[in-house]
Image (tube, rainbow, N blue to C red):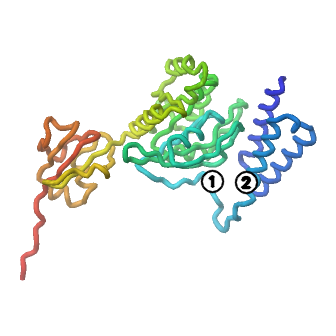
Amino acid sequence: MSRHNKYRFFLYKVANKLRHLEGEEFVAEVDAIIEEIQRKKLDNWGPYKQLISWLESKKDEVLAKPKAKGRQYDPFEIPMSGVGRIALFGLSNVGKSTLMNAITNTEVEVGNFLHTTTIGQAGACTYQGVTFQIVDLPGFLDFKEDWTISKQINRVARTSDAIVMVVDLTMSIDRQLEFLTEQLVESNILVDGKSEYKIAIIASKGDLPGSKETYQELLEKAKWDVYPTAYNNEESLEKLKLSLFELLKAMRVYTKPPGEKPNLSEPFVIRKGAKVSDVAEKIHTSFVKRFRYAKIWGPSSEFDGQQVGLEHILQDGDIIELVLHRQKTKAAK
């Protein structure tokens, strides 16, 4: 076995040992791994030196955390935010954290080590005024055929509106698709080829040599929509944000009071297929009962200012003006 393959196998062993440890157990295992590297004099080679530095930084992070009182800290408990949640789901080191840093407001640690990401991390992605949540989950390891499914990863994925598999174009497409699909099946996210969750694929590292050929292979073999991306290309990242926004099946609708200009800075975000009644109720619960008609400007209207009823189906970018019956006032005594 070559030196590089031995090193990679050593990384697999390290990740497998540390993946479920916390606190003092994590620190003790890190110390044992570093001692093993030094005892075998492996640190004479650069990659092992870097691995020791990374392990020591992780150890320092754990030691710096205050001890939890009462309820145990859950590294996978992530509060919801924005109009929807998308979970990034993939093998280790396929570029999920780099993607997070490129399209959200977070700075997730990245590196060439397996399981650089060891907890669930969330960031806010904003596309044309609409913010949704992206969750970066620790990568799967597939070096063992009998590898146990990570319950924590699947638990977070099941709380999301959409699950996006990140597929590395520099790695085997068959290996990644087969393994990730198997995890979706085993966790009942995918049943008989169908899912109640929205599923898509991000093709990562599309700017590296040979990626065009593997991208075409991925398109041929994938059962879901594929979003290509290059992290160093701003136009590519904006297209990806649009694709993720559309995956959530959300749309923006703007409102305007009668005789005034529309407020284009604060859209109402609603699901695709929503009707005028949904917007009226979102503004105020009494508006449906007081509704007379609505005027529509935009994609769903046949002409500007078209009058429509409560059942009119809206489209992304519509401007809506609600015309209501006046509220009845109590007669003065």
Q: Secondary structure at mark 1?
A: loop
| Residue position for label 1 | 75
Where is residue 288? Give x, y as percent. 19, 55
Residue 198 showing in the rendered view:
no
| Residue position for label 2 | 22
- Looking at the figure, which quarter contains the N terminus? top right
Within 10 Å of disc 2 (Cα), the crowding (few <14, some 14-19, many 20+) is few
Of the image marks 1 and 2, the number of the one nearer the N terminus: 2
Q: At 48% from the left edge and 49% from the top edge, which residue is drawn?
A: 124
Q: Secondary structure at mark 2?
A: loop
Q: At 71% from the left edge and 65% from the top edge, which residue is drawn?
A: 67
Where is residue 96? Give x, y as percent. 58, 38
Above or below, comparing residue 28 to residue 189 in the picture: below
Above or below, comparing residue 268 to residue 94 in the picture: below
Judge from the rendering whether residue 158 lies leftward or rightward of residue 61; answer left or right: left
Where is residue 229? Give x, y as percent. 51, 30
Q: Amino acid at mark 1?
A: Pro
Would you identify the image quadrant in which residue 172 lies?
Answer: top right
Q: Are marks 1 and 2 in contact (CB under 8 Å)?
A: yes
Within 10 Å of disc 1 (Cα), the crowding (few <14, some 14-19, many 20+) is few
Judge from the rendering whether residue 224 lies leftward or rightward of residue 32; answer left or right: left
Mark 1–mark 2 Cα distance, whole angstroms, equals 10 Å
Would you identify the image quadrant in which residue 42 lies?
Answer: top right
